[in-house]
Image: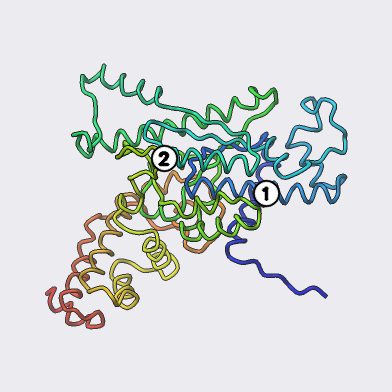
Amino acid sequence: DEGIRLHKPEEECCLGPACWLWDFLRRSGAAGFFLPLSGGADSSATATIVGAMCNMVTAAAQADPEGEVAKECRRVCRMDGDDAAAAPSSWVPSSPQDMASRVFHTAFMGTDNSSEATLSRAKRLGEAIGSYHLSIKIDLMVEAILKVFQLTTGKMPRFSSRGGTISEDLALQNIQARLRMVTAYLFAQLLPWVRGRSGFLLVLGSANVDEGLRGYMTKYDCSSADLNPIGAISKNDLKRMLLWAADEYDYDVLKDVASAPPTAELRPIEGDDADAEHTQTDEEDMGMTYEELGLYGRLRKISRCGPVSMYRKLCVTWSHLSPQEVAAKVKRFFYYYSINRHKMCTVTPAYHAEAYSPDDNRFDLRQFLYPTSWTRQFAVIDAMADAACVDNVDEAHKKLN
């Protein structure tokens, strides 16, 4: 007798969303998926999940060419109607890559701020999975939008590294991100036509839990899509999944992806080495690490912590830090959490993989408008830190009064 096999967490993060995507794809009537593939961990994780879907569907179709999975595969791949031409009625994909080439479309949407390292990783991953891959330069679109702005206002924004303000810098970053979303939907509608096929493509998003929790994402950029298979999974869990999938599916490039520093690549590259990793990193931009964010998310959602209770718990967990340092980290997190919570109101539907999802529309019914100063809570935290004793609540309250 075979015993019950329990999947590893890394497997669940990959195989669960893969089944979800297949179910959605076959029921939607779409001709496949379109994914903006940046070569970073998040979009690579989404691509890997689609690759896992193709592996499972191909295996099931080959095992029973007349079964329901094979029939649905022929329909989704457009091998059972007018698009099928002379394909045999018992057609099944010859390999997962064969299926991916028919239903999975990826595109690296680069600008002058993109590095050769991410371009290479995106291309190699597309080849490993078997996707219909494109490399698109969107600089002309960015320049056109900025020209309209200049003609209207008489001003041209600059990056902060070139003398601009923070507002100018953010605007220049955000327009790149949002144009990628517009480009994704254009290609999703027209690529089947380009390839001589019928139908449309579902756009896949790649925003992880940590970005949603911290608000480190542009509203209506590539995080806005039809489906987001990684929307309830943290960055560190995704990296573990990538390393598992690298061995499971022989996607060796995923090891390079997992080891690369996360970067948005929205600011100009500093330095002369075009092949080097980008100097703009997510963790530096956010002012906190992904490991810290993962812990904040679990405490906020699973342990139901607010600012004060989170501070109390982290003073124990982070005993190597002073109470003042812990207080500064907790207050920084809740400040950014509160000012960016509104972004969760427009978040893309995601597979609910973990208990720490910040998605307010479906799995987290907390309000999205908070006082960003957290006056009472931050005052209590400061008093506790000054007292240098996390358990002495009475003394902290006396200092407040």
Looking at the image, which residue is at 47% across and 46% down? 40
In the rendered view, would you say 19 is above or below 159? below
Cα–Cα gap, marks 1 and 2: 32 Å
Which SS class for mark 1?
helix
Q: Quadrant location of residue 149?
A: top left
Identify the mark at residue 81; answer none if there is no mark. Answer: none
Looking at the image, which residue is at 84% across and 38% down? 91
Looking at the image, which residue is at 40% across and 22% down? 140
Residue 172 percent coordinates (x, y): 31, 33
Residue 255 percent coordinates (x, y): 53, 54
Q: Quadrant of the C terminus?
A: bottom left
Side (left or right) of 236 relative to 324 = right
Which SS class for mark 2?
loop
Residue 128 percent coordinates (x, y): 63, 44
Side (left or right) of 194 relative to 394 = right
Q: How many discs appear?
A: 2
Q: Quadrant location of residue 148?
A: top left
Write down the residue under mark 2. Answer: 275
Q: Quadrant location of residue 320?
A: bottom left
Q: Amino acid at mark 1?
A: Met
Please state which of residues 125 and 216 is positioned toward the viewer in this rendering: 125
In the rendered view, would you say 245 is above or below 117? below
The residue mark sitting in front, 1 or 2, is 2
Identify the mark at residue 53; answer none if there is no mark. Answer: 1
Residue 186 percent coordinates (x, y): 53, 27
Q: Amino acid at mark 2?
A: Asp
Residue found at the very far front of the displayed protein: 273
Side (left or right) of 321 relative to 15 = left
Please state which of residues 236 and 226 is positioned toward the viewer in this rendering: 236
Question: Closer to the N terminus: mark 1 or mark 2?
Answer: 1
